[in-house]
Image (spheres, rainbow, N blue to C red):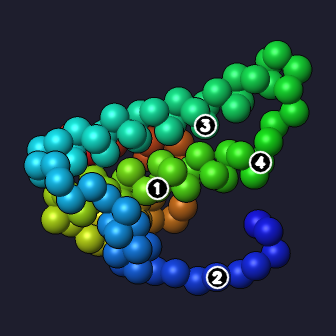
Amino acid sequence: MDGMEVNITLREYQKLASRTMREDITREDTISHALSGMVSELGELFALYQKKYQGHVFDEKHAAVELGDLLWFIAEYCTAMRWNLGDVALININKLRARYPEGFDANHSLHRKADDI
């Protein structure tokens, strides 16, 4: 995005992000903090799109910052749940591969199996 390419695994990201998590609150409070943070950051990201209707130019850099904040809260949630962020990402990819073996297909989306969450 800014011309600098850095590769980082989701595991590395989660470990680095966890350095800035509060350690003086309960696990339950950490989970609540992460969930409320996700909603807040998603709202901030959405607000950038809403401002377009008021004549503002969409700020891609600002959007990337808000998306990074959202990712931080997702990592915080995974850490509190004792999940690996990379494993969660892989679960999602495997679900999508099973649902759309040949890539996205509207028919598969409209007629999913009953147990396909």
Give the image location of residue 61, x and y in percent: 75, 51
Residue in the image at 51% along x and 36% along y? 42
Name the residue beneath numbered marker 3.
Answer: 45
Q: Are marks 2 and 1 in contact (CB under 8 Å)?
A: no
Q: Is residue 44 above or below residue 2?
A: above
Figure disc tally: 4
The disc, 2 or 1, on the residue closer to the chain's N-terminal end is 2
Name the N-terminal-most of marks 3 and 1.
Answer: 3
Distance between the Cα atoms at labels 2 and 1? 16 Å
Quarter of image, res 46: top right
Looking at the image, tell me whether mark 2 or mark 4 is earlier in sequence order: 2
Tell which residue pokes out farthest to the front in this image.
Answer: 24
Q: Which residue is the site of mark 2?
A: 6
Q: Between disc 1 and disc 4, whose residue precedes?
A: 4
Give left or right: position of 30 versus 94. Answer: left
Disc 4, SS: helix
Q: Position of residue 77 (x, y in %)?
A: 27, 53
Give the distance between the C-alpha atoms of the residues marked 2 and 3, in whole angstroms.
23 Å
The residue singled out by tag 1 in the image is 71
- Identify the amino acid type marked 4: Glu
Is 78 situated left or right of 49 in this image? left
Q: Which mark is residue 60?
A: 4
Q: CA gap, disc 1 to disc 4?
A: 16 Å
Q: CA distance from mark 3 to mark 1?
A: 12 Å
Query: Which residue is at the front of the view, 15 or 19?
Result: 19
Q: Secondary structure at mark 2?
A: loop
Residue drawn at 17 percent across, 42 percent down:
29
